[in-house]
Amino acid sequence: FYAQLRSEFAFEEPTSEGGQIIFSQTSDISTLNPILTADFPTAYITGLIFEGVIGTSPIDGQPVPGLADSWEISADGLTYTFHINPNAKFSDGTDITAEDVEFSYEFVRDQCDGWSWLYKTLDDVEAVDEKTAVFAAQRGKPATHARDMFRIMVFRPELENAQTAHQQFFRNGD
């Protein structure tokens, strides 16, 4: 994907390092904790901090690798199998596993009001091994929002309690 991206957009080597990125928005973000994200400005910023299972190509809007290097979709559109990059790590160096993916999706689907509607068509999420996560959509209801659904940010299971997570996030910074 990165080779395709480089061929579509002419990049030049930076003339200097460092600096600032200024992003203008009409409202403040509400948190840097992905569990508590419930509005677009916050989702945009946390999306720059946390990686999703897949991303979206700026070239054509199609799904591209994120935490998952590759994936398969069953012929009936009800089973999605993602293969997590073996080098994917959290900022503290801890490996990101399929169990982290499973936890993140189940938590958002079952306990987060802001975006949970995207995940209600999922029957099951299962970590079948350390680097493979399988999602099963409800029969007759393929994951109609698949591009958005699989972009959810993956976070550490220690953030399970949103209120505690909010306090921990700002106390520890991760």
Image: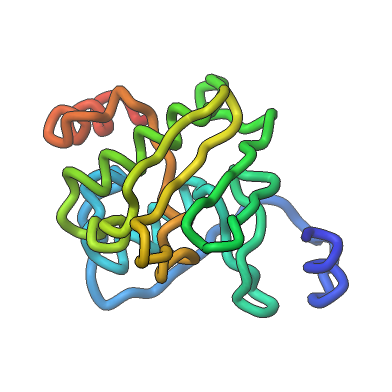
The image shows residue 51 at horizontal and vertical percentages of: 51, 47
Q: Which percent across, then down, holds residue 119? A: 31, 56
Q: Residue at x 35, y 38 (%)?
A: 104
Q: Residue at x 36, y 66 (%)?
A: 140
Q: Is residue 110 above or below residue 146?
A: above
Quarter occupied by residue 99: top left
Q: Is residue 85 left or right of residue 96?
A: right
Residue appearing at x 33%, y 26% in the figure: 157
| Viewer-proximal residue among 134 and 48 | 134
Return the residue nearer the eye: 93 or 135: 135
> Is 132 or 12 nearer to us in this picture?
132
Q: Position of residue 86 (x, y in %)?
A: 68, 29
Residue 68 x %, y %? 62, 44
Q: Report the side of 82 relative to 156 (left or right).
A: right
Residue at left offset 25%, top offset 33%: 170
Q: Check the image and report above or below for 95 versus 124.
A: above
Q: How many marks?
A: 0
The figure's colour scheme reads rainbow
> Is 12 or 98 nearer to us in this picture?
98
- 80 vs 99: above or below: below
Q: Quadrant of the C terminus?
A: top left
In screen coordinates, is 112 left or right of 89? left
Q: Where's the N terminus, which quadrant? A: bottom right
